[in-house]
Amino acid sequence: MNNSRRKFLSSISMLAASTAVPLHAFSFNTSKKLKVVLVGTGVRGITFWGKRLVDQYSDIIEFVGLSDINSSRLAYAKKYIGVKCPVFTDFDTMIKDTRPDLVIVTTKDSTHHHFIIKGLEMGCDVLTEKPLTIDETKCQAILDAEKKSDKNLIVGFNYRWSPYATKIKELLMNKTIGDLVSVDFNWYLNTYHGASYFRRWHGEMESSGSLWVHKSTHHFDLLNWWIDSEPSKVFAYGDLEFYGKNGPFRGKNCRSCNHTKECDFYWDINEDKFMKELYADHEHEDGYLRDNCLFRNDIDIYDKMSAQVKYADNTTLNYSLTTYSPFEGWRVAFNGTKGRIEASQDIPYHDSPTISEAEKHANEMKQSKEEELSYESIIVHKLWKEHENVEVAMEKKGHGGGDKRLQDKIFKTSEAEDPFGRTAGIRDGAMSILIGIGARRSIEEGKAIDISHLTNLKPQKKR
């Protein structure tokens, strides 16, 4: 192994610990690029971890393989991403034939553990989309595999990297409101984005572990990072009261439903060229319906969720997730010994919305370079003083600008010091899902769940 190659692979190892030497400093030529494979060619895989990597970082990485159980979708993914690498329906064969440096996992949540563990065992570093996995048994298996391996696991948490979230972190780090005491966090999914989870495999517990894990892990990671401690205990409530068996209509899927004129949630996938070409055109192979019925009886996850979490440093968190709100947005409030911080995004009553609710999620997922900046406030209110507004320059595309900053950190500026500690490793990934797993267990068992009883990780006062 030449010296540049050795330094390159070393940088990936160091990145898992939040520090790294510069990748762009190694002057890679074609034979020295980082060899990458992708398993899972759904929308997140082929856009953010596929085409965007090719468009932005092709000078230092090359795709040497794509894998999926659906060969028809694989062919489309290869064309969409714009690569010439071979495709595989068998993951093990892909790893053996291509010998990659880095495996990117973007499969169904319930299978993340399989490809993470296999990748580590077969001598590859692994980067996985959130969530790390869906239950405590699979989580422990990943922890064990990473410990045995001399390779590393990186979790792709993009929300930490948005300028707005980073500004909140800065204010808390600087003790702007003294020592943190409690946090209130409310997330609202609208009837476009929220409903989309119930159309897909996410609506079934065995595939997603519920939105406590698939969606809320985003929020729990943000909160763990903001609070700068680890969760120790969780108590939760949840129920299924709107989607699934509660709906007034039922059909095989939206396209073939007899209630298209009566159902407010009707969506014709064939009118969305990208979704049709990525999913509907290939469902004959695996039977996966991207426009499944929101009210099918197979849905068994919760659509109403709230939890109270106690952290190892004694901070308490009150959390809720609404899955069928008329608008999409969130609110958070931090109470400290010297004051209070309030922050929110996309609350329509705070200003005049410039886009519709239907456009919000599509805009958030876009990876294009063009962006119109706006400004949003964070309210800081110190005890016995007037409140002040802290203005933050905002982006909307690519998860509030977090997507591009996360990838730049991994592939371009990994040497740059990050005072906010935004890079997430295996422990961060585990602690984020363990709150959701604990919340699910709490609902099932009707009691508070100790996080330390789920895996061999013991919550730390300082993360």
Image (cartoon, helix red, strand yellow):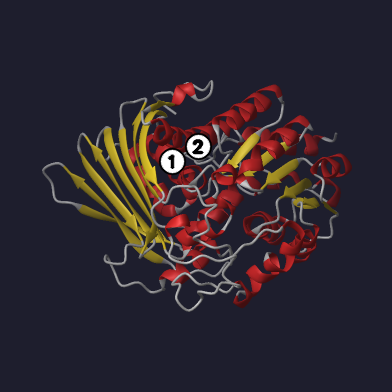
Q: Do callouts 1 and 2 mark residues in contact (Cβ within 8 Å)?
A: yes
In the rendered structure, the answer to whether residue 158 lies left or right of residue 128 reads left
Name the residue tied to disc 1: 220
- Residue 86 appears at what percent x and percent y? 86, 54
Looking at the picture, which amino acid does disc 2 mark? Ile
Amino acid at the residue labelled 1: Phe
How many residues crowd around disc 1 within 10 Å: few (fewer than 14), some, or many (20 or more)?
Answer: many
The percent position of residue 134, horizontal first and vertical second, equals 56, 38
Q: Residue at x 52, y 52 (%)?
A: 299
Query: Where residue 381 sits: x, y (%)?
Result: 20, 47
> Label 1 to label 2, Cα distance in Å?
8 Å
Residue 323 seen by the camera: yes
Q: Does 373 sit above or below residue 416?
A: below
Q: Is residue 257 left or right of residue 354?
A: right
When the figure is inspected, residue 13 is found, relative to residue 50, above or below; the finding is above
- Give the residue pinned by disc 2: 433
Is residue 7 in view from this perspective?
Answer: no
Residue at image location 76% in from the left, 47% down from the top:
36
User: Residue 59 occupies which quadrant of the picture?
Assistant: bottom right
* Front-most of residues 24 and 401: 401
Picture quadrant where residue 51 is located: bottom right
Q: Is residue 238 above or below residue 243?
A: above
Quarter of the image for the C terminus: give it.
top left
- Horizontal relation, residue 52 to residue 234: left or right: right
